Image (cartoon, rainbow, N blue to C red):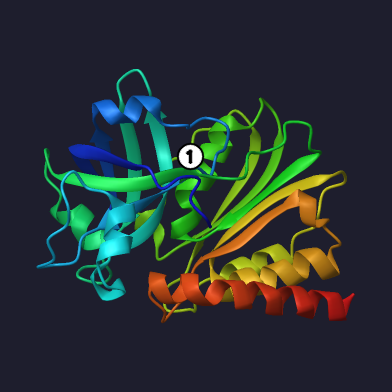
Amino acid sequence: MAERTKRVTTARVARTERITPHMIRVVLGGEELAGLDVGEHTDHYVKLIFPRPDVRYPEPFDLNAVHRELPREQWPRLRSYTIRAFDRAARQLTIDFVHHGDEGLAGPWAAAARPGDVIRFLGPGGGYAPDPAAGWHLLVGDESALPAISVALERLPVGAPARVFLEVSDGAEEQKLPTAADAEIVWAHRGDRPVGERLLAAVAGLDFPAGDVHAFVHGEATFVRALRRLLRVDRGVPAERLSISGYWRAGVDDEGWRASKPEWNRQVEAEEAAAR
């Protein structure tokens, strides 16, 4: 996903909250948030900027200057996260982080974050919002897609038919998901199964309602690839009615996934073309 701009926004942690055993909500604040272009999409995301330890960066911080003047191994690391909520009047932006101990980069940062801590980011980007004219909606994802799906549910019109499949590690990770839609929400508990295995089975067994479907399917790349084939080839969902992408890939860090994703997309498209 390409950023809309190289403009960097600086914010400070306002407060944090652990909303489930493995999900931490961080609310960011600051005057620079007033001008963010947030509102059109339900999958708005930002790219959080994490400095490398022991590297001195120019102040005021300028990412373009960093990229010009420093070797790549000293560039800050970026992590993409969905905006869970945005209050323009209060100048506050909310992001939910999956946290599994010391694993990863952003999760441990969120667990250690305290009011006043500074964080910078690029964006926002985004590309999906549920079509209010759709016959019905299909929303599928693991924990990484839960914030975007939560926002989509909040945005759906009153009574809009929706089938929602969400996979989390266990029952303690379920969240209340307010919506005015006629939404059938199914929580799949992964346990020790591979990520997305239960989601694939659930969607494969779904008796599709009649009418035009608008679908949003995101999460770990392996199951997303399988679901993309199921929806595009087996179910015949047109590409323009499907927002689908691997947010992450098991066994690969974010930098590695971003580098390999274009080739991954080409392979998936070639497989679909051969199957049709």
Looking at the image, the residue that sits furthest to the top is 89
Above or below, 7 relative to 242:
above
Is 120 in front, or is 274? 120
Above or below, 111 relative to 12:
below
Looking at the image, the residue that sits furthest to the front is 69
Tell me: 254 left or right of 269: left
- Would you say residue 266 is visible in this rendering? yes
The C terminus lies in quadrant: bottom right
Percent x, y of residue 222: 57, 76
Residue at 40% from the left image edge and 70% from the top image edge: 254
Percent x, y of residue 72: 31, 72
Tell me: 196 left or right of 275: left
Q: Quadrant of residue 15?
A: top left
Q: Quadrant of residue 91?
A: top left
Above or below, 196 relative to 236:
below
Residue at 60% from the left image edge and 62% from the top image edge: 245
Q: Amino acid at mark 1?
A: Leu
- How crowded pointer 1 is (Cα within 10 Å; few <14, some 14-19, many 20+) is rated as some
Looking at the image, the residue that sits furthest to the right is 276
Percent x, y of residue 223: 59, 73
- Say what secondary structure mark 1 lies in: loop
- Would you say residue 18 is visible in this rendering? no
- Residue of label 1: 177
